Amino acid sequence: MYRTQVAWPYQSSAVMPQILPAGAENAMVPRMDIFETEDQVVYLLEMPGINSEQLEVEIEDQNIRIAAPMLNINPRESSYRYQERPKGQLARIVDMPPDVDPESVTANMKNGLLEIRFRKTMGDKKGKKINVNVLQ
């Protein structure tokens, strides 16, 4: 069985729910799931309507920074009759797990979902033998 943290009935303690980059205090935070397979840790973020060419995904220290502008209409070409969808910036910073290889990261965008995959390091799977001294 994998080391899984269940998020019910409360938010999982493994992930800070909303950490925003400096200057992005009013940004929208994409919803996210984190799951793992036998050899990978996978982040899955909702990114509806985001232009993948403007999407920024970076690793800074032990953090993954995700940012993208929410697309708006061009005010020189048209104007809103009704406006309900959020506008501005989409941003989130999440901790990178300590048991993954940052060089193995891959990111794919499909159907409004951003999938970030890390390969787990094998060193953390082995236990450490502890010698027990018998005292008399």
Image (cartoon, rainbow, N blue to C red):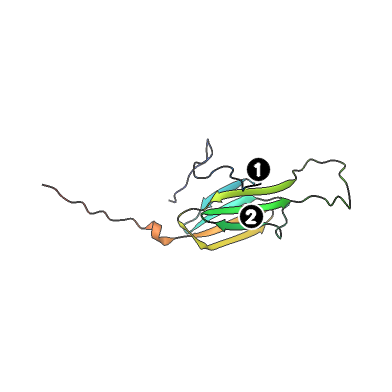
> Which mark is first along the chain, 2 or 1?
1
Figure quadrant of residue 57: bottom right
Question: Between 2 and 106, which is closer to the camera in this rendering?
Answer: 106
Give x and y (percent) for residue 48. 70, 50
Quarter of the image for residue 128 reads bottom left
Residue 5 location (% of width, % of height)? 48, 44
* Residue identifier under label 1: 25
Q: What SS does tag 2 mark?
A: strand
Instruction: Name which residue type carries label 1.
Output: Glu
Q: Amino acid at mark 2?
A: Leu
At which x and y percent is residue 130?
A: 26, 53
For disc 2, the neighbor class at 10 Å (few under 14, some 14 to 19, many from 20) is many
Residue, x 57% and y 48% (percent of image)? 33
- Residue 125 percent across, percent down from the top left: 39, 57
Residue mark closest to the camera, 1 vs 2:
1
The residue shown at (60%, 56%) is: 115
Q: Nearer the viewer, residue 105 or 91?
A: 91
Residue 10 image label:
none
Element at badge 1? loop
Question: Which residue in the structure is indicated by mark 2?
Answer: 114
